[in-house]
Image (cartoon, grey):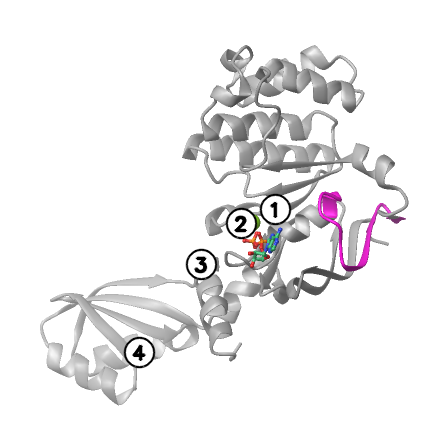
Amino acid sequence: MTDVILKVENLVKNFGKFRAVDGISFSVPRGKIVGFLGPNGAGKTTTIHMLLGVTSKTSGSISYFGDNFDTHRETILKRINFASAFNTLQNRITVWENLVVFSLLYEVRNYTKKIEELCNHFEIESLFHKRYNDLSSGQRTRVNLVKSLLNDPELILMDEPTASLDPDITDKTLTLIEKLKKEKNLTLLYTSHNMDEITRICDEVIFLDHGKIVAQDTPLGLTKRVKNAELRLEFDGKEKILKKYLNEKKSVFSFPNPNTVVVKVEEKKIPEIIFGLSQSGVWITDIEVIKPSLEDVFLQIARSKKHDKY
Ligand code: ADP
Ligand code: MG
């Protein structure tokens, strides 16, 4: 039996007459990283806030470790944590004081050592005595990440934790997440707008749009839904023949440079096109296939939703 850490059923949130989250159901198994994606306003943050009990839900149910969140809130909150680029700790006290306060709340043993180790990893030891208010947004995020790891959580809900980080710190964050997943079976619900990050760390992706789940799959499964790849060919002369052939095939193509053509094509048709072009006498000097990425999936869902086609 899979060990389900978080189970959400028919979760709804209304703000007055506006329904921000519209009956979503999903579960997060232990040791998995689940990406939570969607355009701005899709309802991701509202969902995460309900999962933390910061925002009350309108209806539906949330359970962690098999226990109902409504009735076991205190014990559950000790076993999970939260990180975001947006939430703020106490502004008027120092980084160190903030982290000590949270360590005491979480009843962390040996917290001095733990805070030092985590701050060392995120390269913020030099900020211990700075007031939280005086930090840059990237520095704040890093303090938030340290806070989110203090209680050795079994699950962390992360709402765009890397939004304001430099690429090297983002990489360090992802590396630490990968390490914790491997060594401690850490489970994550992870929101980001960076598709490379999602592709790198997520086992599964949930796409939210207008408060509803519109797709749910592995990153690879999702990219396979986008059939069109891009075929980029360098060729010698014979542009006319090339155009004629591609028009006959009803292909969509463009010429970024005089001797380069980019063809949008179903992946499985690529060999046929290359073969057909050389048969017609076009001399191909270089071939590059650009496969669909999660970014393409995101765009496809966001666009087609507007036209109600997806
Ligand atoms: P996301 O995190 O996916 O960008 P949010 O969950 O922040 O989206 O917002 C979802 C929708 O709910 C948006 O249309 C937003 O304007 C609305 N919303 C969020 N919080 C409130 C609130 N407190 N009152 C009214 N509407 C809200
Ligand atoms: Mg948000």
Marking on residue 198 = 2
Judge whether residue 164 can be spotted in this image: yes
For marks 1 and 2 on the same chain, the one whose residue lies earlier in the sequence? 1
Marking on residue 38 = none
Q: Is residue 14 above or below residue 225?
A: above
Q: Which residue is mark 1?
A: 190
- Residue type indicated by callout 3: Glu
Is the CB atom of the residue marked by disc 2 within 8 angstroms of ligand 1's nearest atom? no
Q: Nearer the viewer, residue 156 or 20?
A: 20
Q: Is residue 304 above or below residue 174?
A: below
The N terminus, quarter of image: bottom right
Q: CA distance from mark 2 to mark 4?
A: 32 Å
Q: Which residue is mark 3?
A: 295
Point out the frontmost of discs 2 and 4: 2
- Residue type indicated by callout 1: Tyr
* Labels 4 and 1 touching (C-beta < 8 A): no
Which of the 4 quarters of the picture holds residue 41?
bottom right
Asked if residue 5 lies left or right of residue 192, the reply is right
For marks 1 and 3 on the same chain, the one whose residue lies earlier in the sequence? 1
- Residue type indicated by callout 2: Ile
Examine the structure image and report whether residue 143 is included in the region drawn in magenta.
no
Marking on residue 273 = 4
Query: x and y percent of residue 102 in the render?
Result: 71, 22
For marks 3 and 4 on the same chain, the one whose residue lies earlier in the sequence? 4
Query: x and y percent of residue 225 in the render?
Result: 52, 70
